[in-house]
Every structure is written in structure tokens, then in C-alpha cells.
Image (cartoon, rainbow, N blue to C red):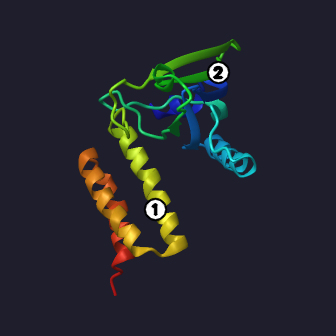
Amino acid sequence: GDFDYSVFPIAFDCKMSVESTGFGIVEAYGSQEAEKSSRSIAAAAGQQQQQQQHSIEILNTGTLFPSARDERGMTRGGILLIKLVKDVSQTEAERRRIDVIRRFVDREGMKHEERDTIVIPENAQLPYYENASVRKAVLLVRFVEAMRMFIRTHDRVALEAFVEHFKVESAVIGDKTLEKDLNAMRDILEPSH
């Protein structure tokens, strides 16, 4: 059972990065490395008036353990998000391509590098969500950003507008666990006495 997942690692010295010539990487979410890389991008933006780069490390961990799967074959847990902007200097084909590179050492000490190429469909409407999990993750990132903005500005109108957006997105996603976040925003806007 769970013992196997917490005791027997599947890989070591695991690194994951994202590269794209057609998109600029503006920000990353979901891991300490992603957050550090986002801070580096922001620092570079302040120094060079450039807010994007074309390669970013989003994961760097010493040991990786497997995750249990539910009856549908799905795992529950983290997700890594990358905020992209189109690089208009590139061709349309280049703008749709993103490479994800994974490097790791297996239990026998062999080094591996795997590369997956993601091609955003030519007719994709932006924002583009591959599935409901990605859409939920994006919504939760926006939730955190909206709450941080409210803490800084106390702009009730902006938070009320976001609550409406959150309701619509929650309905599309169909995940009842989002109700707690919606209720948290409602409590801020209408505290009970």
C-alpha cells in the first residue's frame, strides 16, 4: 500500500525545465524552483526592461517518490504552471511549440533525459486549457493574486468582480472543493457580525 510509495524512491537528482522559442516565459508556479525562477525573471525585468525568457527550470529535487493512483488511474497532488506570452518575432509554428525536458538518475545510477514537445493547437482559443485540472490550477493562481491585491489595495470592487469570475469558472470546472475559496472571499466582502 502506501508504504511502498513513501519508502521506495523511483528517481534521484530530478530536474525539469521548460524551453520555447515561440513563447516568452513570464512566470512559473507550483514549486520552489518555479518561484525562484519567477523572482529571477522579475529581477531581470527590472534591470533590462525585459519581462520574459525562453527557458526556465521548474523542478529540482534530490529524490522522487511515486504517487498512488485512484480508481480512475489519476493521482492527486501538485501541478506546475508556466505563464507564457507569444513572442511575435517568431513564426506561427514556433509560437505553438513548447519543450518540457526531464533529467534524472534511476535506481541503477543510469542518467536519463526525456523531452516532450507540446504543440498548442493551431485554432486554440486563448486562454487555452488542456483540461479541467489545468483550468482549476489557473483559477487558484488567480485567486491567490486577487487576494494579494486586495490585501494591498482593499479594492472591494476588484474583488467583487473576481468573485463573479470565480463563480463562472467554478461552474465550468465542476469541482465542489472550490466553494471554500468562494466562501472565503464572500466572508471578506460581507463579514458576519
- As helix, strand or loop, the secondary structure at mark 1 comes to helix
Q: Where is residue 128? Give x, y as percent.
A: 37, 36
Q: Where is residue 167? Give x, y as percent.
A: 28, 58
**Type of the residue with mark 1:** Ala
- Inspect this view and state whether residue 81 appears: no
- Residue 190 left/right relative to 138: left
- Mark 1 neighbour class, 10 Å CA radius: few under 14, some 14 to 19, many 20 or more: some
Distance, label 1 to label 2, CA atoms, is: 35 Å
- Mark 2 neighbour class, 10 Å CA radius: few under 14, some 14 to 19, many 20 or more: some
Residue placed most toward the observer, 192 or 43: 43
Q: Where is residue 94? Give x, y as percent.
A: 51, 21
Which of discs 1 and 2 lies nearer the camera? The answer is: 1
What's the mark number on residue 146?
A: 1
- Residue 167 left/right relative to 9: left
- Inspect this view and state whether residue 76 appears: yes
- As helix, strand or loop, the secondary structure at mark 2 comes to strand
Q: Which of the 4 image quadrants contains residue 159?
A: bottom left
Of the numbered discs 1 and 2, the one sitting upstream in the chain is 2
Q: Which quadrant is the N terminus positioned in? A: top left
Q: Where is residue 114? Give x, y as percent.
A: 58, 16
- Residue drawn at point x = 29 percent, y = 62 percent: 164
Q: Which of the 4 image quadrants contains residue 110?
A: top right
Residue placed most toward the observer, 83 or 178: 83
**Type of the residue with mark 2:** Arg
| Above or below for 17 versus 35 | above
Residue corresponding to mark 2: 103
